[in-house]
Image (tube, rainbow, N blue to C red):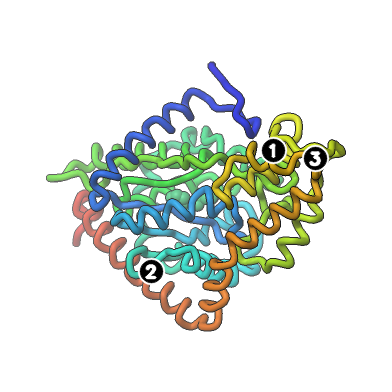
Amino acid sequence: MQEEVTAAGNEISDSFRAAKHRSDQVLAELAKNPSRYTMLTGDRPTGRLHLGHYFGSIRERVQMQNRGVHTNIVIADYQVITDRDTTEHIRDNVLNLVLDYLAAGIDPKKTMIFTHSSTPAENQLLLPFLSLVTEAELHRNPTVKAEMEASGHALTGLLLTYPVHQACDILFCKANVVPIGKDNLPHVELTRTIARRFDERYPGQAPVFPEPDAILSDTPEIPGLDGRKMSKSYGNSIMLGATAEETAKLIRKSPTDSERKITFDPVNRPQVSALLTTAGLVTDRKPEDIAEEIGNAGSGALKAYVTKSVNEFLAPHRERRAELAKDMDTVRDLLVEGNKRANQIAEETLDQVRSAMGMRY
Ligand code: TRP
């Protein structure tokens, strides 16, 4: 297998490259004819959104929404219990996700936002879909394997089958484009298999389900402040909703190295380079140029620049967020509306599924 190493030190496999190529083709088509596309993507409500989420996905969702793609976001609350034993803070996490979506420019009049647990018709698709996959196929999913190992728990039935549930998320609203990170590629592949098998097994006048395409972001994976992957559990993430002071403190505490001259070198200087990458994204500048500008002024000057540019970039988001948070009743109402609508759409799809299966009584 041919492999290459990216700036972030990650390997890119041939299959990833093929998926990216396909994704670029679909995006080019989508740009010509946005209204022909239905997007569904989502988040697990396990915490707050950070800059990695913003540049990796939220920004693109807003763009698709504003171009006229039919856009849908699932807050995947049943996915939270795939590998953890508690739903503590889940309500708070869900409402904070909605706040960040809205502050980032998601318009609930254009984008349907809903949760698993409030859309029974969506969940019901799981039963026929489960009959279309084998246990061996489920066990082969590399993301499920990795998540099981990371959780340190026994493999639960839900962790094994959640990719099928994710197919329900995607197919109930007949989404044909699914923006995701590379971890989720096997799930979109499975979704395509399920769509195809359903229509083969229960052929009607017209296929019930489209075979959706994965959309992979162009943004390089944004590293956390310590150079590792940005992740809440590492405490290295800049939260969209944090205060300017919290952000300043986090950046001040972030580790660097003992070399005074600032250079952009992700392989040998991951920590300094993570700071430069972050500043590059929020200022839309090249990390190399920022490094050059700071030069011998050292990591103190670099951190000051990162703090200032991140806080400036996030200030409008944070202002809108604080404004919205004053009226949480309205935020909750938006979610109730989204749930109602999602359930209606799922009921219509379920009706087509029942018809195709000869189960209308
Ligand atoms: N598994 C996705 C994640 O961890 C979240 C998700 C749930 C999702 N359902 C989805 C993404 C449907 C795309 C489509 O980020």
Give the image location of residue 103, x and y in percent: 50, 68
Tag in front: 3 or 2: 3
Q: In this view, does 132 lie to the left or right of 225?
A: left
Towards the viewer: 218 or 136: 218
Give the image location of residue 255, x and y in percent: 81, 46
Tag in front: 1 or 2: 1
Towards the viewer: 307 or 213: 307
Image height check: is 323 above or below 93? below
Element at label 2: loop
Q: Sequence order check: which comes first, mark 3 or mark 2?
A: 2
Give the image location of residue 24, x and y in percent: 37, 35
Image point 24% across, 41% down: which residue?
199
What is the number of the mark on residue 292? 1
Residue with the mark numbered 3: 296
Image point 60% across, 29% down: which residue?
6
Q: Which amino acid does label 1 sit on?
A: Glu
What is the number of the mark on residue 108? 2
Which quadrant is home to the C terminus?
bottom left
Q: Which amino acid does label 2 sit on?
A: Pro
Label 3, ligand 1: CB separation under 8 Å? no
Name the residue furthest right: 258
Image point 52% across, 32% down: which residue?
140
